[in-house]
Amino acid sequence: MSISYITEEGLKKLIAEVDKLKSVDRPRISQEIADARDKGDLSENAEYDAAKEAQGLLELKISQLEDKIRNARIIDESKLDYTAVQILSKVKLKNIKNGATMQYAIVSETEADVKAGKISIATPIAKGLLGKKVGDIAKVKVPSGEMEFEILEIGPIA
């Protein structure tokens, strides 16, 4: 797994999620397995099979999150330069084609939340914006073709 850059807040959320999975979900699934086991023949016990499958998925999720935490590097936001678009930049854009304006915060993959206006640095739009300055036109390749955005503002994520 590769190194991912993350905010301190994002890392705390990952740690809290792993703690919840281990302290709440893991014991609950273990209890479900024990309850299903008590019902008799395991070879024909759908509840047991479902609980074992849920346990496997939970352990996989815990493992993946622990890998993310292990490979996370906290970004010192005080040392970021907002003259060009980079991770942890809030960018105001204007779609050249239709004149619509939008604002995105460029964050790590683990902190992305499109509904909150936070897009992953791995998305085509974010990749197309990286390194651009206010006034630049960014040509972004998206699945439906190519879009052009004018960079209106760059600043820190508040």
Image: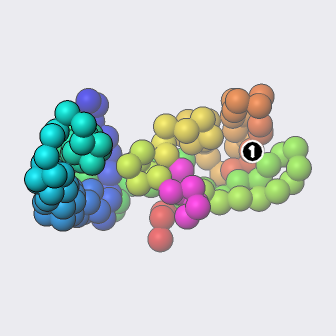
**Residue lying farthest bottom?**
158
Residue 111 rendering spot, x and y as whole percentages: 41, 54
Q: In the depicted view, which residue is nearer to us: 11 or 51?
A: 51
Q: Is residue 110 left or right of residue 31?
A: right
Depth check, front residue: 32 or 132: 32
Q: Residues within 10 Å of mark 1 (few under 14, many from 20)?
A: many
Question: Considering the numbered disc 1 on the image, is that residue within a helix, a strand or a loop?
Answer: strand
Q: Total marks drawn?
A: 1
Residue at the (11%, 53%) spot, across then down: 38
Relative placement, left or right, of 91 versus 75 is right
Say which residue appears at 20% left-offset and 33% top-offset. 43
Which residue is located at x 77 percent, y 28 percent? Answer: 145
Q: Is residue 135 visible?
A: no
Question: Which residue is tagged 1?
Answer: 149
Give the camera-side residue of 142 and 75: 142
Residue projecting furthest to the right: 98
Magenta segment range?
113-119
Instruction: Give the residue at x 57% y 55%.
Output: 114
Q: Position of residue 90 (x, y in %)?
A: 55, 59
Q: Please say if 89 is above or below 136.
A: below
Residue 36 visible within the image: yes
The amino acid pointed to by label 1 is Phe
Q: Judge from the rendering whether residue 148 lies leftward or rightward of residue 38; answer left or right.
A: right
Q: Position of residue 141 (x, y in %)?
A: 69, 30
Q: Is residue 78 above or below residue 59?
A: below
